[in-house]
Amino acid sequence: MSSIRRDREQGDAPRANIVQLRDLLGQRFPRVRMNLAEKPPAHPCFATGVPQIDGLLQGGLPKGVVIELVSAQAGGALTLRRILRHAGQQRQRVALVDGADAFDPAGLNNDLLAALLWVRCADAAQALKAADLVLRDGNMPLVILDLHGNPAKQLRKIPGTTWYRLQRIIEPTPTALLVVTPKAMVSSAEARLSLANQFTLQSWEQTEAELVSRMKFVLQRAAATEVHEPIAVEAS
Amino acid sequence: MFVVIYIPEFFLHAVLRAEAGLEKRPVVLIDAAEKKPLVLQLTVAARAVGITEGMTPTQALARSTLLQIKPRCAAQEKAATDTLLQCAYSFSPSIESTADGVCTLDLAGLPNLDHEALASEMVQRLATLHLPAQVGIGRNPWLALLAARAARPCCVIKNSTQFLNALPVEAIGPSPETLAILHKWGIHTVGQFVALGKEPLSTRLGPEALALHERAVASSTRPLKLVRPPQIFEETIAFEHEIETIEPLLFILRRFLEQLLVRLEMMYWVAQELRLRFRFESGDPYEKTFRIPAPTSNVETLFRMLHTHLETLRTEHPIVALELSATPGRAINHQFGLFESVLRDPNHFHETLARLTALVGAERIGTPVNEESYKPDAFRIEPVSLEGSAGFQPAVSPTSSRLPLQLPRGPALLRFRPPTPARVQLAQGRPISVDSDLPSPWGCGTESSAHRTGSTGAGGEGQTGNVHRVHDARGPWRNSGQWWDKDQWRREEWDVQASDGRLYRLCHRPDGWFVEGVYD
């Protein structure tokens, strides 16, 4: 009897430690699921106005997390313009940290630009510093860090830990962070969307809304929505 | 009942309150404007080493090597007087600026107060403003003043006769000659003086004795000359040694800010604007006004605002004088709307904007506003609106008449600023190849180079950049403007589909061909 009790006691100690560790992790990282059966918590979202993105991310860009949009070929700037147009219509403030000073405001009228904070950075390193400041502020519901116009040489110099730092900053804030990159590089991204588009001169026959609706978004990674296979969505 | 707030050694404390810890050190005050300056007032520590009023600075320095000599400062004395009046006004609307460092309050009309508690609260409140006060309460202004002078630090007169009898005769202010006579008679207290009788005193000492007797009895009252405290909130200091680094400056600024905010709070105001002024060694002034988006009395918020600015400030000369003033305003209370994006913390956002401005430059942060011009890339940057919904135009919907009926056509342009120079080969007036050092990842040495199949070889000899064959082109779109002035511009645009699969905007200007951007 005594040996069984001893075994039980020895078995209980690590179990208690695990429970304690799980509780600690749960407090420290409230967004992390402790088991697969647990449903992901519902987070408020920032609706982008791009039906494919809102559909894939179940309502929009979730606040408090980093979302990466990989625009390897074309479509990144058009997507951003669409998001900014929708935010302007909804009177939502947006900060655009422009890593290559490449944004063209002529595509939006002044009414829609009134709620935009545009930070025109000289390079990717400066853009990351600016994004850090804007995220710490916590006043903006959406921060867009646009790095997809920056040279690859600058992007390669970004330490991997930077993305985890941004993730830690944004976690307690009601801010959504969308990072637009030319290739997958944001290791802390909760979800990664990839764009595979190409425009032709015939694209001028179509309106912005038509072009966006024909764009193909691929969900490559999603912590909240258990994605095993990439999901591609095109608006009907 | 009347209250008198009395600040002993007022001129000295007006100077000392700007710097922490000086009141415990040997410090004397002189009037630097005098031909032969003498010690006017001094701290307890200075008196303890044997320094007295009337000594020359040399004599005073001979008694202590640690002695600090401070000159009188009219601006600091005015700030201290304003502080005293503002503090008094927070207790009673009927106040009189009786003398330098003396303020009389009439408590008539106020609800029954606990006089001891009131006096100690006054002392505490002035202590937070670095003014050591003595408070006396009596049934008339003169009695209250006598109580204040005798207070350590509070004195409430309940039995005036008993109080007066115990006072030294010097308290009623006799002339030195009369005082000497009284001492010869063995009269040392006010009680002994009053016991002599009014008529015998006037017979022996003349008219002065009548006035002294009236003060000693303290039976008459007088109306106060009521004043209102000035709405000026200002603190100033002239440095003994020039300031070259930010740390001592921040230390004093924080002290000033705390004092200003306490003064504002006493008047039920908050800070709406801060004005920082420096005077450099060269004599040049510097002024910076901080408009506070959401008026506040939060020290941390306002101090961060000053700190952020000073971190980026570079001056050629050291600072010799500093002045900080606050403009009072009412706190803004507003209800947040359900469907509008209001800044949660406008002051923090303002500070963030200041930090971003320091990082990227003032002309590179803000809200873009398209100019009413056909010139491409014509926009200006305006400061971001810190107001909530008030700064925005009314909400627009896709069907709103404010929007153009048709949304823009085609993909968005990702601009190259400045445009990249290019060499363009033409055939029958149309571009057939483009050679340009496009910024990566649009140009060479990047992952995108994999898409540039067959691009080389299309260019002519001597081409060093990325040569792209043009598969299709649309144009030219000719445009010009401002032909009437020196900023005249003329251009010809082409939209081309290059062999790398991308769409570029080419531009032909009088100074050559450029790639203006990529359609993305």
Image (cartoon, grey):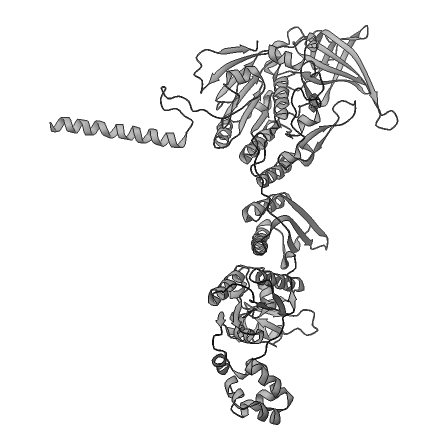
Residue B512 relative to residue B290: left or right: right
Q: Is residue B285 visible?
A: yes
Q: Residue at x 75, y 26 (%)?
A: B378
Q: Is residue B328 above or below residue B59?
A: above
Q: Residue at x 78, y 11 (%)?
A: B475
Residue at 55% x, 19% y: name it. Answer: A69
Does residue A149 show up? Answer: no
* Residue drawn at point x = 55 percent, y = 14 percent: A52
Left-right relation of B163 to A73: left
Which one is in front, A123 or A80? A80
Where residue B251 appears, x then y in whole percent? 56, 53
Counting from the top left corner in percent of width and height, residue B494 is at: 76, 13
Of A149 and B89, the residue lying toward us: B89
Quadrant of the rendered structure where residue B508 is? top right
Query: In which quarter of the view is residue A158 placed?
Result: top right
Tell me where residue B335 appears, x and y as whole percent: 57, 38
